[in-house]
Image: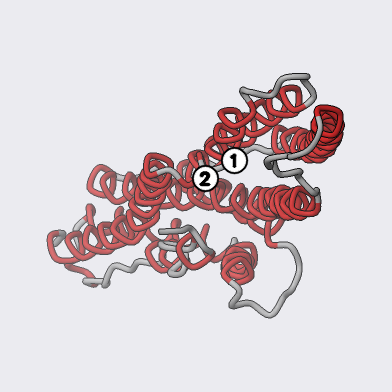
Amino acid sequence: MRLDRRTAALGLAAAGAVTAAVVVTMTNHGSNESPQRRDVSAYIVAVNDVQHRMGKPLTRVLTAYRDFTGHGSSARDPAPELADAAETLQMLRARLAALPAPVEARKLRRLLLGLVGEQADVTREVQRMATFSPRFARALAVARRANVALGAALHSIQVPQAHAVHGTKKQVLAAQTAYERAARSSAAAQADAIDAYDAVIEQVLRRLATLDPPEVLEPSYATQMKALRAVRASGEHLANALRQPTRSVVPALGRKFVVSSRIAQSTAAQKAQIAAIKRYNARARAIAASASLVQREELRLQSALP
């Protein structure tokens, strides 16, 4: 299970829920209308007036969502648009919060503020996704290219194979000396390739350290950081061992180096990321549920007030 733009936009695809929920009406009962109904009607008129006066900024909120999900006509970076969208929604909430509500409409007011607040919170998280995800992907792409380069470098190094030598004592000694020389040269070349790989991984780690992951991508970020640190450390140990006169620990360190690179694919890491996505999806879907509560409360007031 992965988080793509479609998943990230759950609950935001119906971004009009905010404005649609805000635009509520109360049927006029004419001269038989109760003071309570008039007060609630006046409050709703004020709410609608706030929404209408923010019509253009709220339209840009929808544009930001469409651009982020790939359904808009703009090819520009959606992150700044989403940041503006979050500020717009926060401003809308502040203006709605400043409106006094009669006793009968207090629940409606609370639901409206909750809806817009949820929308602003999720929009901020989506904005952080839009900022973080491309940079995260670019950094990991550098690491993947380094992996490929390391594999190619190690494959190109000719490793001498031990074999039986027959001949005089002098010939055997010469063959052993040549083998040790070739083995040391091969091991040194392997160590140099691993050092070059570690240098790239260090650069990737520094780049990743400057990023601020959103909550929904925190598990993936933490796992990748852990894996890259482990690979870098095990690579350093392996390179040092390869340069030693005796290299008996090299096989064990080599296995550790390989295992370190698989941390990000562990079952535990995948479960943590899936759980984070499910939590995000629940928050996003809650927006639609909150919009429904607003509409139901408006209908209740419509029928309950004389």
Q: Which residue is mark 1?
A: 213
Q: Is residue 163 above or below residue 41?
A: above
Residue 40 image position (x, y, % from top left): 29, 55
- x then y, percent, for residue 66: 58, 72
85 sits to left or right of 146: left
| Camera-side residue of 284 and 175 | 175
Q: Residue at x 69, y 24 (%)?
A: 247
Contact (CB < 8 A) between labels 2 and 1? yes
Residue 240 vs residue 168, the one in the foreground:
168
Q: Quadrant of residue 20?
A: bottom left
Is residue 176 shown left or right of residue 305? right
Identify the amino acid type marked 1: Pro
Q: Does the image show residue 211?
A: yes
Amino acid type at image mark 2:
Leu
- In what quadrant of the picture does the N terminus appear? bottom left
Write the residue at 43% across / 41% down.
269
Q: How dense is the environment of label 2, judged by Cα within 10 Å: few (below 14), some, or many (20 and up)? A: many
Q: Quadrant of residue 163?
A: top right
Q: Secondary structure at mark 2?
A: helix
Q: CA distance from mark 2 to mark 1?
A: 6 Å
- Quarter of the picture containing the C terminus is bottom left
Residue visible at 67% across and 54% down?
137
Per the image, the residue denoted by label 2 is: 217
